[in-house]
Amino acid sequence: MTFNSLFATIAAASLLSGCASSVFLLGGGATIAEAEAAELALIGRVNDILFAEGDTLTAELPAAGTANYNGIIHGMDGGGGTGPDMVYYADLAVEVDFATDTLDGEVTNFVTDVAGFENPTGTAVVAGTVFDNGGDAELEFTAAGTLFGTTGAADYDAATTSGNFAGDTAQAAYGDHISDFEWIAGPNIGTTSISDGDWNIEQ
C-alpha cells in the first residue's frame, strides 16, 4: 500500500454519468480550526477503505463511466518562499472519466491563516489524467486560479506529486501536492508563499 506524507487519506467514489457535482465539506467562511476538524474526520472515514482493501490495481479500474469525488486539499508552511508563511485548506471536487482516463474539477472555499486573506474568493480549475504505474492505478492533476482576499490577491497554482486510487473498485483517491500563492495585489505583492501538503477525496 502507498501512503501520503501525512495520512493515507482516500476517497470513496461511485460510477456515475453526467457532470461533476460539488459537496462542500468546508463551505464558505470556515475557520482554520473547523477546516482541520473536517479534514481529520475525512481521514478517519477514508482510511477504513484503504486498510480494508488496499490500493487499486489498474486492472480493477472501470473501463467506462464517470465517478464524482469530493474532499479537501491542505497545504502547510513550505518554507523557501518570499511571501508570508501560509497554512490553507480548500474544498476539492473532481470528476474522473474512466473511458478517457482524464479528470477535471475545481478547488473552492479556501481557508488560510494569512491576515486579510482568511477566506479568499475565487475558484481554481482542476485538470488531470489517470495512468498505470507498474500495475497500480494512479492519477495526477494541476489546479490554477486567482483568489481575492480583503487586502490582497494571489495567483494560486498546485500540482500533485503523488496520487493513488484505493479500494477494490477505485472507490478512493489520495496523494500529495506542491502549491504556490503568487501575490499580485496587497501588502505582499511581488512575493510567493509556498504551501505544500496532501489532498484527499471521497464520494
Image (cartoon, rainbow, N blue to C red):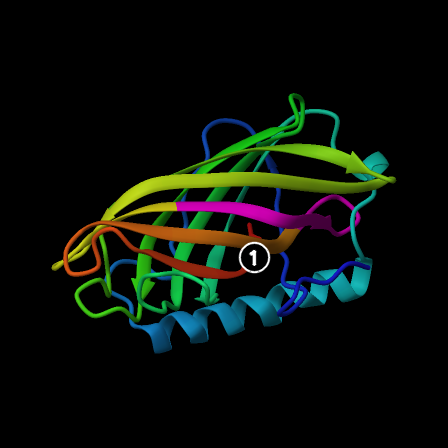
Q: Which of the image's four quarters has the N terminus?
A: bottom right
Horizontal side of 11 relative to 167 (left or right) equals left
Between residues 130 and 59, which one lies in front from this camera angle? 130
Residues shaded magenta: 157-172
Residue 62 lies, in percent from the top left, at 74, 32
Residue 125 lies, in percent from the top left, at 39, 36
Horizontal side of 143 relative to 155 (left or right) equals right
Magenta stretch encompasses residue 25? no
Q: Amino acid at mark 1?
A: Asn
Residue at the image position 39 percent from the left and 69 percent from the top: 35
**Dot 1 alpha-carbon crowd within 10 angstroms: few under 14, some 14 to 19, many 20 or more:** many
Q: Which residue is mark 1?
A: 200
- As displayed, is residue 92 above or below residue 19? below
Assign a secondary structure to mark 1.
strand
- As displayed, is residue 13 above or below residue 101? below
Magenta stretch encompasses residue 170? yes
Residue at the image position 70 percent from the left and 67 percent from the top: 48
Horizontal side of 69 relative to 53 (left or right) equals left
Between residues 148 and 154, which one lies in front from this camera angle? 154
Residue at the image position 49 percent from the left and 55 percent from the top: 71
Q: Quadrant of residue 150?
A: bottom left
